[in-house]
Amino acid sequence: MLKFKLVIGMCLVFLILGITCSFAQTAADAKAKAQERIKAMDTNKDGQISKEEFMATCKGTNCNQRFDTLDTNKDGFLTKEEAQANAATAKEKAATARENFKNKAQSGQQPAN
């Protein structure tokens, strides 16, 4: 039984390490991809994305709602500053999610006495 717990514990450790490395590796990639998308959306190259520019490239559902959420100052444009603030918020949410996942995995490693 002890060997079984050790094997399960090691599997969880490797899983956590793999997920952590995966998040770290993709953070830089995500930032680069986001910058590329922003440049592509800014079709008139004025340094900001209008709602029309956003809607022309938006895929999926709730595009109006997503734009309104991203446009924090409600001026009808997405600026670099708003994008950075939204990215920071997303980064915080991802860190919280990773921490929650790690805590759940660690609690599963504790012996039940």
Image (spheres, rainbow, N blue to C red):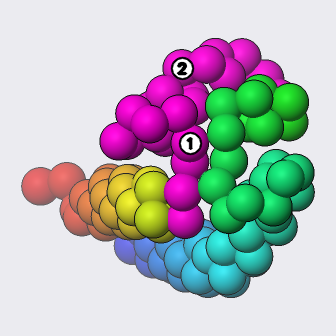
Query: Which of these two is toward me, 26 or 108?
Result: 26
Residue 17 is a magenta residue: no
Note whether 57 is above or below 49 in the view shown.
Answer: above
Query: Which of these two is toward me, 107 or 21?
Result: 21
Seen at 37% across and 41% down, the residue is 72
Which percent across, then down, holds residue 60? Answer: 78, 23
Q: Quadrant of residue 74?
A: top left
Q: Amino acid at mark 1?
A: Phe
Kindly report which numbered mark, 1 or 2, lies closer to the viewer in this rendering: 1
Q: Which residues are magenta?
A: 59-80
Q: Are marks 1 and 2 in contact (CB under 8 Å)?
A: no
Residue 65 circle label: 2
Seen at 84% across and 53% down, the residue is 44
Q: Which image quadrant: the N terminus? A: bottom left
Q: Amino acid at mark 2?
A: Gln
Q: Assign a secondary structure to mark 2.
A: helix
Q: Assign a secondary structure to mark 1.
A: strand
Name the residue that disc number 1 marks.
77
Query: Which of these two is toward me, 66 or 25?
Result: 66
Seen at 45% across and 72% down, the residue is 9
Residue 62 is a magenta residue: yes
Give the alpha-carbon distance from disc 1 to disc 2, as whole Å: 14 Å
Q: Which image quadrant: the C terminus? A: bottom left
Residue 22 circle label: none
Seen at 75% across and 76% down, the residue is 32
* Furthest residue toward left: 113
95 to the left or right of 38: left
